[in-house]
Image (cartoon, grey):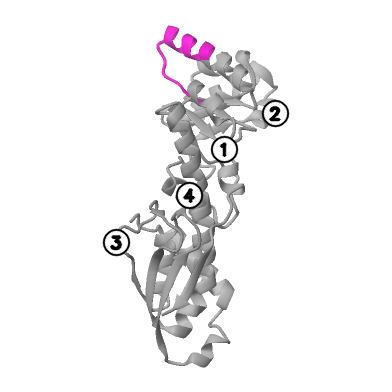
Amino acid sequence: MNHLTMGEIKFLNRYLKGDSRNGDITSSILGERRGKFVITVEEPCVISGIEPVSHLFQSVGASVLLPDGIRSGSNVEKGGTVMTLEGLSREILRAERTALNILSRMSGIATLSRKAQDIVEKTSPGTRVAGTRKTTPGFTLFEKRALIDGGALPHRLNLTQMSMLKDNHIAALGGGPEGIKKGVTELRRLYGPYNIIEVEVEDLEQGGMALEEGADIIMLDNMTPKRCGEVAAYIRDRSRELSRTVTLEASGGITMEDLVEYAPHVDVISLGFLTYGARPVGFRMEME
């Protein structure tokens, strides 16, 4: 399992405290009674959230047992057991809803991510799908973890990771190819060669400028599959002439249905719907 970061642990403690404060007034009637509880999944899915949920239950004094083969990223069938818990019943029940909400949300994202990556891989081996920053404030770290569990790339975790020159930055710098030139030049001046620069482009001219100015990643934004292929082919040809390597990314308005039309043209397809469009997976916890 991938260990939780201190940042993730702080969020988890905050979630639990936000739901139950110092306890669960209903479960308090259970006193010192101990129990054994089993969490099962209500539909086939790619499980995600094992690490944070294990931490939550352990933080209230419960022991956690995982069945053989169960880990984040595993395929689980309907009715499958994903976790067994033993401890004070009142404490396990206090953490129940917070834990199941996390499992539900993360597994939904992981399942959708796996589906998208499988579609792309069959069409264009080596092309990857990625998430975006269209995440839930306060839950971003776990949504990014779920993307990874599903086989997708997380993209940037936050604004300090990689420079991404988007349409509004370019517009603020005068727009068009010249706006791109100014932006890339200034980013290189400020941060030197160790900072990866991604540039969002809308047409062939902007793509050519981004390449010539030294962008590491060029995002082909809101293009039809046909236009994406034309711009990608031009950039690849020009990059060979310049003896440069560049990563091409497609984004904007791409759906599960037209993934296969974009995949052959680019290295990465970033999809906001992997996080904001994922349907939660159902889980239940019952006492044995």
Up/down of 63 relative to 206, above or below: below
Q: Which amino acid does label 4 sit on?
A: Ala
Q: Give the x, y percent position of residue 23.
A: 53, 83
Say if mark 1 contacts mark 4, CB within 8 Å.
Answer: no
Q: In this view, does 70 lie to the left or right of 98?
A: left
Quick one: label 2 or label 4, which is nearer the N terminus?
A: 4
Quick one: label 3 or label 1, which is nearer the N terminus?
A: 3
Residue, disc 4: 110
The mark found on residue 68 in the picture is 3
- Which residue in the rendered view is the most extreme toward the front? 78
Identify the secondary structure beneath mark 4: helix
Query: Residues in magenta?
Result: 233-249
Q: Give the x, y percent position of residue 81.
A: 40, 66
For the point 54% across and 62% down, the residue is 282
Q: Label 4 to label 3, Cα distance in Å?
A: 20 Å
Q: Which amino acid does label 1 sit on?
A: Leu
